[in-house]
Image (cartoon, rainbow, N blue to C red):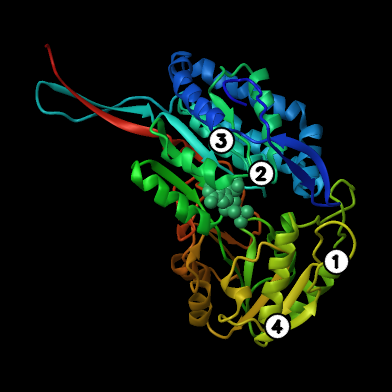
Amino acid sequence: MVNGEWQTSDQSFAVVNPANEVAICQVAEVTVHQLEQAILSADASLAVWQQLGDAARSQCLIDWQQLMRDNLQDLARLITLEQGKPLSEAKGEIIHAANYVKLYAQLAQDCRQAISIPASEGQTAQVLRQPIGVVTAITPWNFPCAMVLRKAAAAMAAGCSVVLKPSELTPLTAMAIAHLSIQAGIPKGVFNLVVGSNAQAIGEILTQHPKVAKFSFTGSTQVGRKLLQQCAFGIKRSSMELGGNAPFIVCEDANLEQAIKGAMIAKFRNAGQTCVSANRFLLHESIADAFIRGLTQAIEQLIIGDGQNETSQIGPLINQAALDKTTDLIQQSLSLGATLIVGGKAMSGKGFFFAPSLVDKVTAQMPLFQREIFGPVVAITRFSSDQEMITLANQSEKGLCGYLYSQDQKRIQQATQQIEVGLLGINVPRLSNIHAPFGGIKQSGMGREGGHYGIEEYLTYQYVCQQNGG
Ligand code: ADP
């Protein structure tokens, strides 16, 4: 959607339902000309959007999120169709995304208030907060709604306009959201959606066009690194929300029942396809066997199936490549000495379903420890001291998220300071909070989304000093 109008082109690509491998529909490939038009119309709409005033801008966002709530069932079905997650999770994603938009509608009212600062005698000094300008963004397929809105709503609340490329694997939800933006009365050109399967070519334009002021990305570290290099040439401000490799630590004093329940959520939500998914289970050797017994029982009870069925608790992976990668990570680790307890392979029949799995005796040298799995696989490593626990937890170039289960306050305090992550859950498996700064350290990225931190990413300071009386 460019400047509020849906466009077509000579070429198209298929969007596939991962639960049955059937094409849902064909979507038109964006052309280079349309991409250019999208950026130019975003640039042209900046003045309109900013002149509307804070209250009217805020109202547009309020109306947008209300439309998402009004269309909850349809949007959820769309997410499940193209992404695979169970309907209940899809609904949760939409509500979460709508809550972000509502929060940013509220913050739009005063995020640009000028700040007076001390000045030399006879002078007045102020810090003004200006929208940075045209924002481009690329989002992934694992949260086709929330990732789009966490960026777009924050940018638009700040007074910026947006050109966004959703993942080619899940463009339909983003298209529905774009449709609702027009219904909400958001002026044409403020939110543009560009859809295409040639991510690299689109990315080059979105990161390098001279009218683009800021680029925001969520996706893999490998792609993020490339995009950051592309941004460097034009010194584009950029935010990168990249991959994780979350440790899920269970100490000897943890409440095991609580830890097992938490593990099921932190690992199997969205079939393990989230950047905050528990990736490396670090267990104190004294509780490891009991934890594995309990977790294996819970895994065996999981109901796997098409997310459209209300009973399904875990859906398919996104595509064949994801199935192959997950199988590979397990096979390579087994060949290096790990032990398979349950699962371990793709399920037979149509759809990209992978059996929920548990692999024991994983060491820091194995791919299951080193790589972000992005699949329903529990990989277990044991430790015998707090020092070893911290060393293992930090033995990753990523630093997005971590989980710690312990009942010992002193241990918790120490570990909190030592674990190198941007988000830490202590005895909780779910960290979602629209007010919190979401983002990582190390190679998990830079910048934050959520709360007022998220809006800062789209504002710039202008310091103004004026001589009084002339
Ligand atoms: P994942 O491994 O989760 O699929 P990716 O980083 O491959 O993550 O994809 C996230 C987003 O980045 C998607 O929208 C995808 O189309 C886009 N993307 C993938 N490769 C490139 C690239 N070379 N340049 C720009 N965007 C890319």
Q: What residue type is labelled 3?
A: Leu
24 lies left or right of 49: right
CA separation in Å, label 1 and label 4:
19 Å
39 lies left or right of 175: left
Label 1 vs 4, first from the N-terminus: 4
Q: Name the residue under label 2.
A: 168
Instruction: Say which element carries label 3.
Output: strand
CA separation in Å, label 1 and label 2:
25 Å
Instruction: Say which element carries label 4.
Output: helix
In this rendering, the label closer to the viewer, 3 or 2: 2
Some atom of ligand 1 lies within 8 Å of the CB belonging to the residue at label 2: yes
In this rendering, the label closer to the viewer, 4 or 2: 2
- Which residue lies at the image location 68% right of the left edge and 67% below the top edge? 325
CA separation in Å, label 3 and label 4:
41 Å
- In the rendered image, residue 154, in percent from the top left (x then y), is placed at 51, 33
Q: Which mark is residue 164?
A: 3
Q: For mark 1, does the 10 Å Cα neighbourhood hold few (<14), some (14 to 19), or many (20 or more) residues?
A: some
Some atom of ligand 1 lies within 8 Å of the CB belonging to the residue at label 1: no
Q: Mark 4 points at which residue?
A: 334
Q: What residue type is labelled 2?
A: Glu
